Amino acid sequence: MAQTKYLAHHFTDLEQQSESAKMGMWLFLLTEILLFGGVFVAYAIYRAWHPETFINAHRFLDVRLGTINTIVLIVSSLTIALAIRDMQLDRRKQCMRNLIITILLAGVFLVIKYFEYSHKFHVGMLPGKFYTFDGIEGTNPHIFFSIYFLLTGIHGLHIIIGMSLIAWMLLKVKKGHFSSNYFVPIEAVGLYWHLVDLIWIFLFPLLYLIG
Amino acid sequence: MENSSNHTNYLNATKGIWSWLTTVDHKRIGMMYLGFIIFSFMLGGFFAICVRLELFTPNGDLFKDGNQYNTFFTLHGIVMVFLFIIPSIPAAIGNFVLPQMVGALDVAFPRLNLLSFYIYLVGATLALAVLISGGVDTGWTFYTPYSSSIGGPVIATGLAVFILGFSSILTGLNFIVTIHKLRLPGITWFNMPLFLWGMYATSVIQVLATPVIGITMVLLVFERVAGVGIFDASMGGDPVLYQHFFWFYSHPAVYIMILPAMAIISELVATFSQKRIFGYKAIAYSSVAIALFSFLVWGHHMFTSGQSRFAALVFSFLTFFVAVPSAIKVFNWVATMYKGSISLKTPMMYALSFLSLFTIGGLTGLFLGTLATDIHLHDTYFVVAHFHYVMFGGTVIAFIGGLHYWWPKFTGKMFNEFWGQVGAWGVFIGFNLTFMPQFLAGFRGMPRRYYEYDPSFEIFNQLSTIGALTLAVSFTIVGINLLVSIFKGAKAPKNPWNSLSIEWQTESPPVTENYATTPDLTYGPYDYDKRQAARAEG
Ligand SMILES: [Cu+2]
């Protein structure tokens, strides 16, 4: 009986269970959007207050690396979607392969981010009072880097959380916890991962492509 | 009564402390929350008594200095708001009752429910660690630039608020999904107890607003650790932006605190009037309306912070607007009682207290929402009194009322009715004695949060302190009465209040899976008229 193996005792059937799980996940994603919303609001206000600073400062971000990272994340969204598809069709091996590729892509993103960060640390483009770089025209250039590090830092933390969740799913697939009858957790993690990608898709133009 | 004396129930189904710490039963989790919440209430009350004793005389003589006084009122605020009121009704009473009202075995995500309890414990422990290490003196509002520049464990306090917020989000999320997906067939949106509508609206705010206080606290931490400067005027930032962020959460948060209280009152008024609730849909929709409008009025905390005059006008208008759904509820409760067969049992006494105190609290809110009067009243004791009439006269009173109402279900024991009445009267009198003089002092210009004050305010402060002590004694009576009932109380029948809500169909205390048989849905939760008609016929 596939039903009883996966069904928690307080649900009447698998459909109710999976619908509940999905609704819970969507609500959680909503809270994530609101969490980022605060920093986006700060971005909007300070960009409105110091428009030239933002334009001058953004030239010091590496558009090339930013673009590569955007592509990396979009591809990783595709691979996790494929992993879910694989599980729907009971293709356990392919599912695991796609999850591994997703984790590797997330790793690539973080490595590239590391190089971007270390360059900025090196030249003193640091947030707030640690800002020592000289050469950006405009009022309060450190504010731009405060916002930059807050947005990309919190986003980076989400990438790390996402990687751990995907790794957890990988482990469960390996142990045979899922089948075409039951794969809601992978779907939920997939949703989370898409959101993390989506937030980057907003961050990228707002930070790298203004002016 | 009909129930056997020693049936297997959720309390004795499994034994040992470990079976409690690892439980996923919503009833046990609710009771564990209840224990810690009441502990927090006593702790916050202790700080309040200290503050009131200091203010008994105009001179600062009880505390070492003004800073210590500031620390005490800050701790009072943080403990009461974040550790007590916000989780009080939803996490303790709601956790227990909500799944039973939808006819479910548990909440949608039982393990998440337990997780939220442990997250609450971590946040509470952190907050208490702050307290032991000397405390903070920022007030519960943590306004920058003060909070980002002073010494003391502000970061730890901010993180504690962040963590507690996370616990609150998980509870809200769990409740929304439970109400949407786990209702028994036959329990429809407009045929479910109004308690559920209130909890639903609360949960929506918890899910939508709490992340914003989360990010605000994160930003405050970064402001202190990394000096990011976004709330620092000397670095091109804006301290008022902090206030916007803070109140974008904290105004809706006052509705996280009051909506559950309204949810309880709807149940108490209908049950103890034995009458169909008047204007079911109006009460249900006004809960949702309050939840939505609460996001649009945060600027009324900042009339004197230098926001634009136009913004202030809009916020003032919207503040008046948000009062409408609350007023609708009050009128509906009063109309429900009209020609009902009212029995003045202890829970109903609290419901009546709520009606009068909340009405005063709500109406004085309008004084503060009016631009011109707010300039005079801003940051005076008038604000303190208004806030306490809503939060204490509203939420705490409803919480204690609900606690008495569902106590037989929680514990299987009846409390002593006489001492229940004494407690209810004591709380009502003590409360008014504490906070009514604060309206007068505030109106005459006594500023809030002051360590020493002008001798002309002495009489108001002395009355207020006497009131606070009356409250302490009354709550002790309430607590002892409830505690004693566990050991000496009469066995509670299934349905001591003759309520139609389905949680009263199960045993007191309930079995682990809530219902031994599927609940009987012949009557809706407020079909008292139908039941009476049926009884008259048969
Ligand atoms: Cu407000």
Image: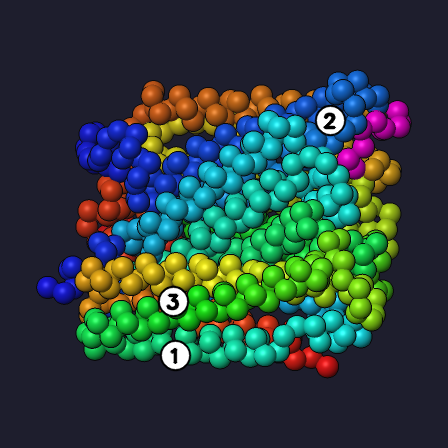
Q: Residues within 10 Å of mark 1 (few under 14, many from 20)?
A: some
Q: Which is more N-terminal, label 3 or label 1?
A: 1
User: Does residue B322 appear anywhere in the picture?
Assistant: no
As rendered, which of B243 and B271 lies closer to the eye?
Answer: B243
Q: Secondary structure at mark 2?
A: helix
Residue under numbered circle 1: A78
Magenta residues, start to end: B448-457
Tag on residue A103?
3
Residue at point 67% right, 60% down? A122
As rendered, which of B413 and A195 lies closer to the eye?
Answer: A195
The type of residue carrying mark 1 is Leu
Q: Are marks 1 and 2 on the same chain?
A: no
Q: Secondary structure at mark 3?
A: helix
Q: Are marks 1 and 3 on the same chain?
A: yes
Residue at point 73% right, 43% down? B147
Q: Quadrant of the N terminus of chain B?
A: top left
Q: Chain of mark 1?
A: A
Position in image of residue B267 (x %, y %): 45, 48
Q: What is the quadrant of residue B328 in the picture? A: bottom right
The type of residue carrying mark 3 is Ile
The type of residue carrying mark 2 is Gln
As rendered, which of A60 and B380 lies closer to the eye?
Answer: A60
Is there CB contact under 8 Å for labels 1 and 2?
A: no
Q: Chain of mark 2?
A: B
Ligand 1 is within 8 Å of the C-beta of the residue at disc 1: no
Residue under numbered circle 2: B68
Ligand 1 is within 8 Å of the C-beta of the residue at disc 3: no
